Amino acid sequence: MAQKGSLKEYYEKREFTKTPEPKGEAKETGQSRFVIQEHHASRLHWDFRLELDGVLKSWAVPKEPPQSPGVKRLAVQTEDHPVDYISFEGSIPEGEYGAGTVKIWDSGNYNLESRDEKKLVFQLRGKKLQGRYVLVNTRGNQWIFFKSKN
Ligand code: MN
């Protein structure tokens, strides 16, 4: 079992009296869900989140996530989010971290096939994204996200 995720950075970045985002907590739900939230912040991006280690491991993807093989996307790892964030949609007010609207672009369950520090392989069962996907760490918080050819 991997180390439990930490929400310290998530809490530090937000004022919960001002943002509608859930405060939440780290918890094991026994589920393996994912969500992709389309986030119209200062720059449009897609937030890819995997339920893992009692939190949502999170990556910001600057271009639309690939629905077929052959397209590689940069994915920048961001702070762990609480599992309750999985259903979040709404508007983060001006002046707050991540100001702008958030709506769910895709969601579903996944099967983790392999995991180490530098690489995750998993099967997504969403409405838009289906099949085997890979996240590979290139350096620092930078990863590459793509659909596997097989
Ligand atoms: Mn975001």
Image (tube, rainbow, N blue to C red):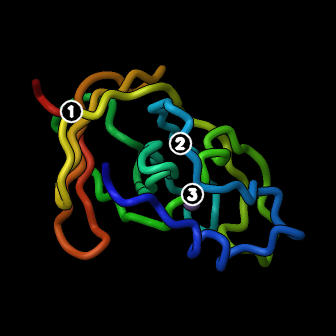
How busy is the neighbourhood of tag 2: few (under 14 within 10 Å), some, or many (20 plus)? some
Residue at image location 58% in from the left, 74% down from the top:
8
The answer to whether 8 is drawn above or below residue 44 in the figure is below
Evaluate whether residue 72 shows in this view. no
Most extreme residue toward the front is 1
x and y percent of residue 125 in the render? 39, 21
Residue ID at (46%, 60%): 5
Q: Secondary structure at mark 3?
A: strand
What x and y, as percent, mark residue 21?
Answer: 75, 56
The reply to whether residue 58 is visible in this rendering is yes
The image shows residue 7 at horizontal and vertical percentages of 57, 66
Q: Residue at point 11% right, 28% down? A: 149
Mark 2–mark 3 distance (CA, rounded to whole Å): 13 Å
Query: Residue 14's quadrant in the figure?
Result: bottom right
Q: Determine which residue is flagged by label 3.
A: 81
Judging by the rendered image, the residue that carries numbered circle 1 is 113
Compare marks 2 and 3 and give the one earlier in the sequence. Answer: 2
Asked whether disc 2 touches disc 3, contact meaning CB atoms under 8 Å apart, the reply is no
Could you tell me how far apart the alpha carbons at marks 2 and 1 are, in whole angstroms?
A: 19 Å
Q: Quadrant of ligand 1?
A: bottom right
Which mark is first along the chain, 1 or 2? 2
Taking the spot 28% from the left edge, 34% from the top edge, the residue there is 112
* Disc 2 versus disc 1: nearer the observer: 2
Please give the label number shown on residue 127.
none
The disc labelled 2 sits on which kind of residue?
Answer: Glu
Q: Is residue 19 left or right of residue 72?
A: right
Amino acid bearing label 1 = Glu
